[in-house]
Image (cartoon, rainbow, N blue to C red):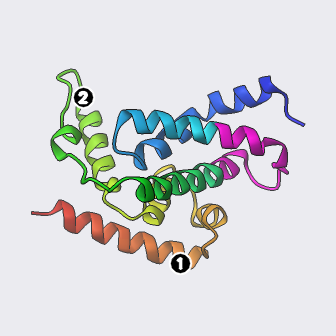
Amino acid sequence: MYTKEAFVRIVQENEGLIDKVARVYTNTKEDEQDLYQEIVYQLWKSINSFRNEAKITTWMYRIALNTAIAHRNKEKRRLPVEPINETLLNTIDTTDTLQEERSAALFAMIKTLNDIDKGIILLYLEGKSYDEIASITGFTPTNIGTRLGRIRQKMTSKHTP
């Protein structure tokens, strides 16, 4: 049984994980904040079902990705999907560094992928092994390797003029 304090500590230690998932699966800051809150809520509802059979981050990614995909599917049914406003995505504060610019460009490319590919590339960029990604997504490690190869091809073809 997890206490409220233990849960808050877990969320604080892994807020970057939640933030990245929310950022990749939304198009506006408001939607990102809503999804972040929904992920935290789903984690809270499920925390006592965590059996320590995997890393806490693996469990959190599974909940976060499932919540993000469900949230996105619900939004698709409710509102027509609007294309990403490239002007807003590429608006960079003058105080941004080169690293922040590259990060923004990477997130913009990731947002063009389908929901499954977004999750896989996000996990890969977090340094997760093929086995860990497979455990989170339910695919085989071989399938993860194949999918990552295709994702790289998609992103490279979109990036090259």
Labels in figure, total: 2
Coordinates of residue 52 in the picture (x, y in percent): 83, 50
Q: Is residue 7 visible?
A: yes
User: How many angstroms separate mark 1 from mark 2 (CA)?
Assistant: 36 Å
**Kind of residue indicated by mark 1:** Asn
Q: Which residues are magenta?
A: 41-60
Residue indicated by mark 1: 143
Residue indicated by mark 2: 97
Crowd rating for badge 1 (residues with CA inside 10 Å; few <14, some 14–19, many 20+): few
Q: Is residue 57 left or right of residue 120?
A: right
Say what secondary structure mark 1 lies in. helix
Q: Residue furthest right?
A: 1
User: 115 or 71, which lies in front?
Assistant: 71
Dot 1 or dot 2: first in sequence order is 2
**Kind of residue indicated by mark 2:** Thr
- Any mark on residue 16, and which? none
Q: Which quarter of the image is occupied by the C terminus?
A: bottom left
Examine the rendered structure and indicate whether residue 143 appears above or below residue 130. Answer: below
